[in-house]
Amino acid sequence: MKHVICIIGGLLMFLMTIQADDTKEERLLYDQALTEYQNNNFEESLELFERLIANGYSSYKLYYNAGNAAFKTGNIPASILNYEKALLLKPFNEDAKYNLEIAKTYTVDKLEVIPEIFFIRWFKLVSLLLHTNTWSLISIACFALSLLLLAVFLFSARYKLKKATFILAVTVFAISLLSLSLAFTNKSLTLNNKEAIVFEPVLTGTSSPGTGGNELFVIHEGTKVEVEDKLGEWYEIKLSDGTVGWVPMNFVKKIIP
């Protein structure tokens, strides 16, 4: 038994050492990228930020600074993509919102945007305040608490206590359902986000995947689209004005932090 405990302890120490080394390397790369940015070496800075992103690292500061570096190099699509990712992690951050609006002024397409109903927009923003797992844990905890309160209601003989616990049980259960809905919304906006940014200078949307479809529209780099479907190496995208067409998937990048 002692040998098993020693082996498990050794494995845990080994995994912690690897994680610490990865974190140290991430920190060094990030600091180097910031140094390059401060020295006006924006291309080198962007390359380092993108290396961190490609390695799976994700944070508001990483995306925000990558957006700044991309903007300084004139890479408008990359700057918009990274600002959008940053806002999925901190939806109310004024710096990222301001810089995103500045970057959008450099895009060619000025498509009509169908506005969302205000309470749907605010519900989405609230869902981004916490991680999907956090909303899920809140939902589970509230559900368990509502069951406990319901049990007190069923087995209590006191009228005032039964009334109070019933009202609380209903309220907490409603919070559980709300948290669950926020968890699903957060997941759809982050892990399953269908929005994407065009990276091709001039991109033609066609009526069908492949080269035989009719040309439906022409858009340009930096435009935000929504990916509706995928077939082979092609995406069916929808523009903000509702227009739908097919484009090669390697010409757009999804906004997934």
Image (cartoon, rainbow, N blue to C red):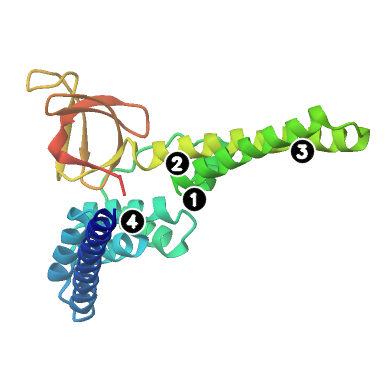
Q: Which mark is residue 236?
A: none
Q: CA distance from mark 1 to mark 4?
A: 18 Å
Marks 2 and 4: which is nearer the front? 2
First of labels 2, 4 by sequence position: 4
| Amino acid at dot 2 | Asn
Element class at badge 4: helix
| Amino acid at dot 3 | Leu
Tell me if 255 is positioned left or right of 121 in this view: left
Q: Which mark is residue 186?
A: 2
Element class at badge 1: loop
First of labels 3, 1 by sequence position: 1
Tell me if 206 is positioned left or right of 211 in this view: right
Looking at the image, can residue 221 be seen?
yes
Q: Which mark is residue 130?
A: 1
| Amino acid at dot 4 | Tyr
The residue positioned 23% from the left and 51% from the top of the image is 77
Looking at the image, can residue 105 be seen?
no
The residue at which mark 4 appears reads as: 83
The residue at which mark 3 appears reads as: 168
